[in-house]
Image (cartoon, rainbow, N blue to C red):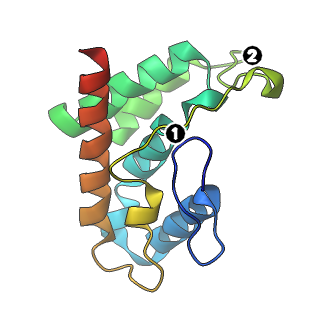
Amino acid sequence: MCAECGAPQIEGFNCWEQLGALIAWEYNDPALHAQHFLVVASYNLQHPAQFNEVVIAELRIAFNDYLDHGVSAATLRQRAAKHYAGATRVLRPEAERQPQLHHWAMTIADVYLPEQPEGAVERLFRWARVIQAYQVGAQA
């Protein structure tokens, strides 16, 4: 089980490896490939310990802009490039990373279902909405 998102291992894959497998599916599924930002953002929002607080706060804004306002991934990449060019650090030093376990209603393990790439986009959007709902609840 992941110490940060609580995802179980699936066929020996930890959550990071499940992310890699899901991204690999993108090469054969244009609809999933079109949602690459959402795949990576969802994963990163469930694994915030590696990022500095400002990066996570801005990722939440981008995530919500994408889901709720249809801001394109290209626009979000341009926005991020302006903030994180050059020597700007987005990752915390490894010694400062303090993963905290959260019990999510959905994790990458609910999206990456081995041998079931069909329906991955729909599962991805359900996962993203779970993350979004958690963010709203956490801010309340």
Q: What residue is at 48 percent from the left and 80 percent from the top? A: 114
Instruction: Tell me which corner region of the image, top left, top right, bottom left or bottom right, holds residue 49.
Output: top right
Q: Secondary structure at mark 1?
A: helix
Residue 91 lies, with reference to residue 8, above or below; the image says above
Task: Tell which residue pokes out farthest to the bottom in this image.
Answer: 115
Q: What residue is at 32 percent from the left and 49 percent from the top? A: 105
Could you tell me how many numbered marks the image carries? 2
Q: Which residue is mark 2?
A: 87
Task: Tell which residue pokes out farthest to the left in this image.
Answer: 69
Question: What residue type is disc 1 on?
Answer: Asn
Q: What residue is at 64 percent from the left and 22 percent from the top? A: 90
Q: Nearer the viewer, residue 2 or 72?
A: 2
Question: What residue type is disc 2 on?
Answer: Ala
Instruction: Tell me which corner region of the image, top left, top right, bottom left or bottom right, holds residue 52.
Output: top right
Q: Which residue is mark 1?
A: 44
Residue 111 lies, with reference to residue 55, above or below; the image says below
